[in-house]
Image (tube, coloured by chain):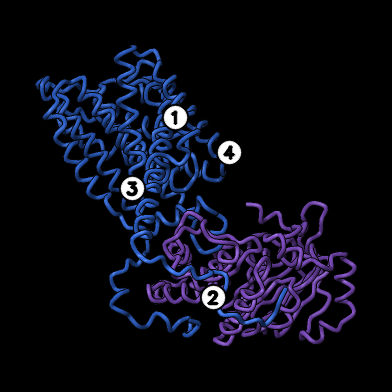
Amino acid sequence: MSFLEVREARKRFGGLTALDGASLSVREGSITGLIGPNGSGKTTMLNVITGYEKMDAGQLEFCDRRLAKPRPDRICMLGIGRTFQLTRIFGSLTLRQNLVVGSRAVPHARRRELYSPERLNWLLDFIGLRRLEDERGSSLSYGQRKLLELAIILAQDPKLVLLDEPAGGINPTLIGHIAEHIRELNRKGMTFLVVEHNMEFVMGICHEITVMQQGRDILTGAPEVVRNDPRVLDAYLGGALEDEPEEESASGSRGPAPAADPGESR
Amino acid sequence: MTEGVLSEAGSSVTPDSVQRHRLPHRRPGAGFGVAAVGLAIAVAFPFVISNPAITSIGIFTLLFVCAASAWNMFSGLSGYIALGNTVFFGVGAYAIAIGAEHIHLRADDSVFLLVPVAGLVAGAFALPFGWLALRTRRHTFVVITIAFFFIFQLLAYNLGGLTKGAAGMTLPVPQWDPVTYNIHFYFAALIVAVATVLGAWLIHISRFGLELRTIKDDEDRARGLGVLTERVKMQAFVISGIFTGLAGGVYAYFVGSIYPPDVFVANFDVTIAIMTFLGGLGTISGPVLGALLLEPLQQYFTLRFSANGVYLIAYGVLFLVIIRFLPAGIVPTVTKGIRAYLRGRTERGMTVLPAAAPDQPDPLPTSRP
């Protein structure tokens, strides 16, 4: 019995097959990595889990419950939070206001505790942006936005957090800082599914890694296993994009968009 | 700084935090003072100036304060530009006309008791209107709201049994002393306007208002965080309709006779939108200020050059000026200026805060790109 389970997910966008029977399993309490070359369907996978895209076929289970028609708001209320590759915060709201946006999703009994001023202060300290709490979200830098987006999710105290490229476009020190945050939260019992191109980051924090290629999961295993598997190297080199992470951090934003995420153009 | 467990953090209550609002928002500042002075002036106005031509302008202005604020509640906060609010205005106007005719009310202040009913009827019409229109976004939404305006104008023309069609409807004319005649309507309009601004303020400080603004920023993201965007939009649309209906009700009783093209009129939406844009979209005082500036101007043009639409030329010019020089509107531009000035003064007066680099917390190089 698994925590999060995706079976044989299929998704087509017109003539393009984004997910071609991909399966994924996330163990409770783990940090699971999801890697693969651009266009392999990673973001689409997150989109179908969180209900931003409808699966054409396949099954989704969370906490032993079958989710027939996932919708973003319901998924969120079940305790699955996610961040986006291109961060999505609320530019016209202050940082503190940004943090309380998700308060509807938590059970009423816990709302007071989770959204108490002390906890919001703590979250702002956690991401190191307390002194900017009354600034508008639009005034933040890219890296700060990523941290704020993470804090918005953390405020809801989700069971499972899906991170879409948490290290993309972020300076190396901050990446280390984020990795530390993830590990610490994981120690407290939070489960993570991380989509990331930065191999060292993924290998460093993940307990288990699933590799995707052309809409299929080709391998699942511990970081050491994945690192040494020839198929993984093949998938990346075959995709002809070996220097992808550098390219993304240099541009400071999302790199070449995977063909399969029209759902993100809002 | 990374001490503590997620769910532990809320357990202790420090004295400093008790005073904080549960929902954080920007402090109201001098807004209350300005509102109190403005209200005092508004109350004194008809007693100081008794010329009916001027008090009439006052009444129309207050009704537009109401209509523009009501429009801003939904469109200004959610970013959905609705151009069919004249539907609510017209429904409110017809509701009071039809109501007064059927109940045979005596023509005195008791007719004003129908104004809240007119608001509720307009709100009821907002339900199916919103249900259909809010399935769409952006440009499509704008076009659909305009289409609704045409549909309602046509209905008013053609449902002769109810609306008397093109012949229009007349309301009972009160036999008040000409000297104080306008004061009744003036205070009815003032109450409606104050209620609307109060409503706008309550929305602004509530979580509901916060959620409306998340829709403007990123609707899908808000939904993904558990904001019930469909419901929030619908509620705001209906509330906006109710307040606009109130203005329509007072308007109908004041002018005494209504015709389909007078109350279901495209200019209504253009006007309240320009008022709100001029004052500041999404602010409380913006639509109020916009109405206070533009409606007297329009009335003046009408008096001066008769009702030949010269004011439309002025509106066109003004609209260009707003877009070119004040794209954010008066209120946000001025507030920003004041804030920047105060900040500059504080920084010159005190020691500048150490500029801690936000992107570089504890260096923990576990990995590199």
What colour denotes chain B?
A: blue
The residue pinned by badge 4 equals B140
- Looking at the image, is B63 positioned above or below residue A166? above
Identify the subunit bearing mark 4: B
Number of other residues with Cα within 10 Å of mark 2, as a class: few under 14, some 14 to 19, many 20 or more: many
Q: Is residue B44 left or right of residue A122?
A: left
Rounded to the nearest whole Å, what is the CA distance between mark 3 and mark 1?
Answer: 20 Å
How many neighbours does mark 1 have within 10 angstroms: few (below 14), some (14-19), or many (20 or more)? Answer: some
Query: In terms of secondary structure, where does tag 1 sit?
Result: helix
Q: Which residue is mark 1?
A: B270
| Chain appearing in purple on the rendered image | A
Name above or below for residue A74 compared with residue A138. Answer: below
Name the side, left or right, on which B39 lies relative to B68: left
Task: Work out whether residue B102 or residue B332 is closer to the camera in this orientation and state it.
Answer: B332
Q: Please name the amino acid that badge 1 sits on.
A: Val
Which structural element holds mark 2?
loop
Q: Position of residue A266 (x, y in %)?
A: 62, 52
Q: Amino acid at mark 3?
A: Ala
Q: Are marks 1 and 4 on the same chain?
A: yes
Task: Report the residue marked by disc 3.
Answer: B200
Front residue of A32 and A79: A32
Q: Residues within 10 Å of mark 4 (few under 14, many from 20)?
A: few
Q: Which residue is mark 2?
A: A158
Q: Quadrant of residue A199?
A: bottom right
Residue at coordinates 71% horizontally, 70% vertically from top-left? Answer: A59
Q: Residues within 10 Å of mark 3 (few under 14, many from 20)?
A: many
Alpha carbon of mark 3 to alpha carbon of mark 4: how far?
Answer: 26 Å
